[in-house]
Image (spheres, grey):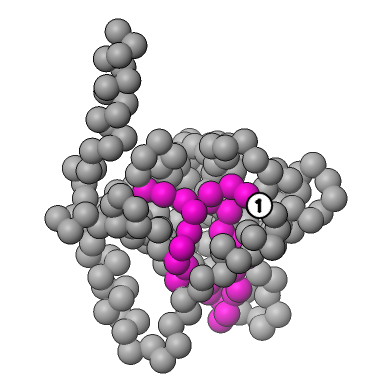
């Protein structure tokens, strides 16, 4: 019996997901909606996060396009994380804590995307070399992304919450990560091909090393 279970797991974990594109590139999307549990006076944040990863050894890439922040110039940067559950039944409050498959402190979680600069009321960022993954036992598909009101203290807040969630404050918006086709990703790349300085960042691994 246990052998059968093991075989099943091996098949599940190693098979190329049936949702993948023929070139073994896997795409996912997350459509941000304002937190149902906030009062109407709070910021109404919407947006889209797109993911791309080549099976089985590629590093995850993500594009964040988020709007609804105030337009003033000195906006604080905002924390964004992957949370454990893809359950929005109680707004963003039912998504649990940070997705933490290896039981480590924040900001060592695979979905700790750190802080995002707000410009002209928007976040627009393309990140590469991310730790989170769309496949295997630690897949983030079916889990959620939460956009917070405050900056992430990156574990340096000298309190327990800092080591769990970075004291990032109110959950402004959230979404569930699901598989999709290549069309949204390809459209984004096409629309941004003419940009002189695409806002691509490889900063995450370096920040993580600095924190360890
Ligand atoms: Cu969070
Ligand atoms: Zn975290």
- Decide whether residue 22 is among the magenta residues: no
What residue sits 56% from the left and 62% below the top?
205
x and y percentages locating residue 137 in the rendered image: 40, 36
Residue closer to the observer: 91 or 141: 141
Q: Examine the rendering and report whether any part of residue 195 can be seen.
A: yes
Instruction: Tell me if mark 1 has few (under 14), some (14-19) or many (20+) residues whose alpha carbon lies within 10 angstroms of its own.
Output: many
Please provide percent x and percent y for residue 118: 59, 74
Q: Nearer the viewer, residue 105 or 117?
A: 105
Q: Is mark 1 within 8 Å of ligand 2?
A: yes
Q: Which residues are magenta?
A: 107-134
Q: Residue at x 85, y 50 (%)?
A: 158
Q: Which residue is mark 1?
A: 107
Q: Quadrant of residue 30?
A: bottom left
Q: Answer whether residue 125 is visible to the viewer in this image.
A: no
From the top left corner, tell me how far across and down residue 20 is, in percent. Answer: 21, 50
Q: Picture quarter containing residue 189? A: bottom left
Magenta stretch encompasses residue 123: yes
Horizontal arrangement in the rendering, residue 30 relative to residue 199 (left or right): left
Name the foreground residue: 176 vs 127: 127
Identify the element where label 1 is drawn.
loop
Residue at 53 percent across and 49 percent down: it is 110
Classify residue 193 as left or right of residue 18: right
Residue at the (40%, 58%) spot, across then down: 59
Query: Image quadrant for the N terminus?
Result: top left
Q: Position of residue 199 (x, y in %)?
A: 48, 79
| Residue sitting at the far right | 158
73 on left or right of 125: right
């Amino acid at each position: 019996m246990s052998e059968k279970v093991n075989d099943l797991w091996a098949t599940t974990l190693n098979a190329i997901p049936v949702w993948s594109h023929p070139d073994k590139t896997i795409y996912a999307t997350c459509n941000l909606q304002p937190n149902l549990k906030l009062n109407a006076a709070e910021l109404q944040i919407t947006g889209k996060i797109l993911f791309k990863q080549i099976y089985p050894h590629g590093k995850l890439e993500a594009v964040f396009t988020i709007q609804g922040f105030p337009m003033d110039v000195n906006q604080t940067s905002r924390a964004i994380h992957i949370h454990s559950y893809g359950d929005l039944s109680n707004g963003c409050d039912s998504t649990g804590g940070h997705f933490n498959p290896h039981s480590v402190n924040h900001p060592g979680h695979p979905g700790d995307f750190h802080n995002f600069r707000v410009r002209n009321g928007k976040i627009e960022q393309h990140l590469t070399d991310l730790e989170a993954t769309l496949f295997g036992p630690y897949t983030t598909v079916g889990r959620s992304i939460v956009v917070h009101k405050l900056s992430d203290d990156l574990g340096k807040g000298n309190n327990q919450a800092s080591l769990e969630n970075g004291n990032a404050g109110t959950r402004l918006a959230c979404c569930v990560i699901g598989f999709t086709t290549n069309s949204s990703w390809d459209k984004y790349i096409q629309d941004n091909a003419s940009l002189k300085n695409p806002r691509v960042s490889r900063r995450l691994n370096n920040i993580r090393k600095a924190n360890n």
